[in-house]
Image (cartoon, grey):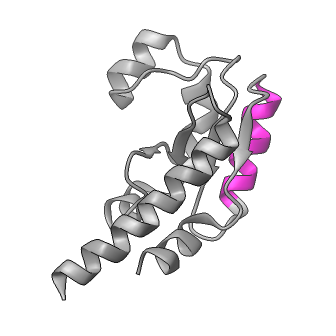
Amino acid sequence: MLQAMRGRAGAALRRLAVAARTMAGASGRARLFDVRSREEAAAGTIPGALNIPVSELESALQMEPAAFQALYSAEKPKLEDEHLIFFCQMGKRGLQAMQLARSLGYTGARNYAGAYREWLEKEG
């Protein structure tokens, strides 16, 4: 059973990686941002995603890079980054996050409309 779960999870991760590469293009690199609450993300998230709750996103994207690195242990996205993918549980907060990021000049912001719920259904 555990092996079967790993197999399905691995297949879902491969599908997500292909989707991210497709969104990013051949030379780009997609970055995933989970904009759900810390509690929601702690219960499970898409591997490799950085959790920044939507309530913190505006201030996070306006931080100096060193402050962002210190707080989130990750490199701050750059305005010119082409493939910043935001997601939440069902799609609404991900859309809000994408719109906010774009309003701050992150023109490469995208929303994973299927959200964590879709990813989890495909994973399991």
Q: Going 61% across and 53% down the picture, which residue do you hit?
A: 19
Quadrant placement of the N terminus = bottom left
Q: Position of residue 44 (x, y in %)?
A: 35, 65
Asked if residue 3 is positioned above or below residue 97 in the image, the reply reads below
Please, which residue is most extreme toward the left here?
2
Asked if residue 97 is positioned above or below residue 4 in the image, the reply reads above
In the image, residue 96 lies in the stretch drawn in magenta: yes
Q: Position of residue 122 (x, y in %)?
A: 51, 76
Left or right side of 59 for 97:
right
Left or right side of 23 for 6:
left
Image quadrant of residue 9?
bottom left
Q: Position of residue 112 (x, y in %)?
A: 67, 56
Q: Going 42% across and 15% down the picture, which residue do you hit?
A: 67
Between 23 and 63, the residue placed more toward the observer is: 23
Left or right side of 64 for 1:
left
Q: Going 64% across and 32% down the picture, which residue do you hit?
A: 26
Between 6 and 108, the residue placed more toward the observer is: 6
In the image, residue 30 lies in the stretch drawn in magenta: no
Quadrant placement of the C terminus = bottom left
Between 9 and 73, the residue placed more toward the observer is: 9
Q: Position of residue 48 (x, y in %)?
A: 39, 45
Residue stretch in magenta: 93-104
Image quadrant of residue 81?
top right
Q: Going 66% across and 68% down the picture, which residue do you hit?
A: 114
Give the main secondary structure, helix, strand or loop, of the magenta stretch: helix
